[in-house]
Amino acid sequence: MSEAAGAPSAFEARVVAGYGRHCLLEDRAGLLYEGQRRGKRGDVVVGDRVRCLRSAAAQATIESILPRASLLLRADGARSKALAANVDRMVVVFAPKPAFNERFVWRALLAADAAGISSLVVLNKIDLDADGAGALALARLSSLGCATLAVSAKAAAEAARTALRGALGSASALVVGQSGMGKSTLINLLVPQANARTQEYSTRLNLGRQTTTASRLFALEGGGEIIDTPGFQAFGLAHLDLQQLAATMPEFSPLLGRCRFNDCRHLAEPDCAIRAAVAAGRIDPARHAFYAELVEEMDRLRRRDPTLP
Ligand SMILES: Nc1nc2c(ncn2[C@@H]2O[C@H](COP(=O)(O)OP(=O)(O)OP(=O)(O)O)[C@@H](O)[C@H]2O)c(=O)[nH]1
Ligand SMILES: [Mg+2]
Ligand SMILES: [Zn+2]
């Protein structure tokens, strides 16, 4: 490159892959750099836009993070973990096999809502949904007002590609889900170079290449982008507070403010509008049980760490 020697030039880049403290940056011309954060550690997340300085061939020092339009978090106990920045859609993928946890999906939806991000739930591997458990879970979500899709990335790949592409539009989408649900397989349908890019990212970050170990961002042809993430089993929500929790349950929110007590927790309080709706069959008891589980979990965490919200 014909760059003048002397002061390194500052440039803006996107964080396209993140793994622990390592990240890969891509500049406007599509060149990749290994990113090093100056001073602070661990505060850069995939999707971030950063200002950096070239430090060596294909290496750059991150000087600052540009303001984020959104930040998606999950939190197990007091440790919150940033999943991605600057996304405006969360795609939650689940599948009949390996066994899925419906509450994982519900938790992911709450996290998206709390971050002000819209979501889409995708049931993948419908070719394996012989007993209909996946379809049933999807119908339950759809009745809560969630946008949903049912696809098979393997048995009906082209239909899956078209449906997902159409649903994503020009969004910046983060794909989450338990391990093995088919997130990467779906993304490969949309991004033909995804495998090659993943190889390159993995080599550069020194990762193995079986399941997804680092989050990585791909531009979509025709606009939009998609971020693949490693599967994880628990979607902690310790960063939410109780008010937020009830307000982000779509079937609870219209009833809030109708309980006898302003600070009703909707668990055992008298004249509770939510519990009345459960008793009347207007709220699914499984969803109320899920809510009670979250409240219990939050209480437990706050007893251990009173500094939580
Ligand atoms: N039968 C069937 N298998 C599928 C389908 N989609 C993906 N698979 C398989 O499911 C397995 C897991 O797929 P991945 O795409 O690696 O899953 P993942 O969600 O990215 O997993 P992690 O990266 O570990 O989080 C692979 O063996 C895929 O071939 C599908 O629609 N039907
Ligand atoms: Mg994967
Ligand atoms: Zn109540």
Image (cartoon, grey):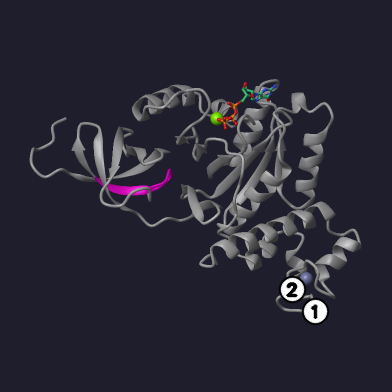
Q: Position of residue 16 (x, y in %)?
A: 40, 38
Left or right: 207 in relation to 155: left
> For the residue carrying disc 1, how many other residues have a C-alpha within 10 Å: few (<14), some (14-19), or many (20+)?
few
Between the residue at mark 1 and the residue at mark 2, the CA separation in whole angstroms equals: 7 Å
Q: Secondary structure at mark 2?
A: loop
What residue is at 75 percent from the left and 24 percent from the top? 127
Is label 2 within 8 A of ligand 3 (CB to nearest ligand atom)? yes
- The amino acid type, in three-letter code, at marker 1 is Arg
To which quarter of the image does residue 68 belong? bottom left
Range shown magenta: 44-52
Q: Position of residue 85 (x, y in %)?
A: 46, 49
> Would you name the residue on which mark 2 appears?
264
Q: Quadrant of ligand 1?
A: top right
- The amino acid type, in three-letter code, at marker 2 is Cys
Left or right: 9 in relation to 4: right
Which residue of the protein is positioned furthest toward the front in this rendering?
Answer: 304
> Would you name the residue on which mark 1 appears?
260
What residue is at 53 percent from the left and 50 percent from the top? 88
Cβ atoms under marks 1 and 2 closer than 8 Å: yes
- Residue 240 located within the stretch drawn in magenta: no
Where is 272 relative to 1, above or below? below
> For the residue carrying disc 2, how many other residues have a C-alpha within 10 Å: few (<14), some (14-19), or many (20+)?
some
To which quarter of the image does residue 61 belong? top left
Q: Secondary structure at mark 1?
A: loop
Is label 1 within 8 A of ligand 3 (CB to nearest ligand atom)? yes
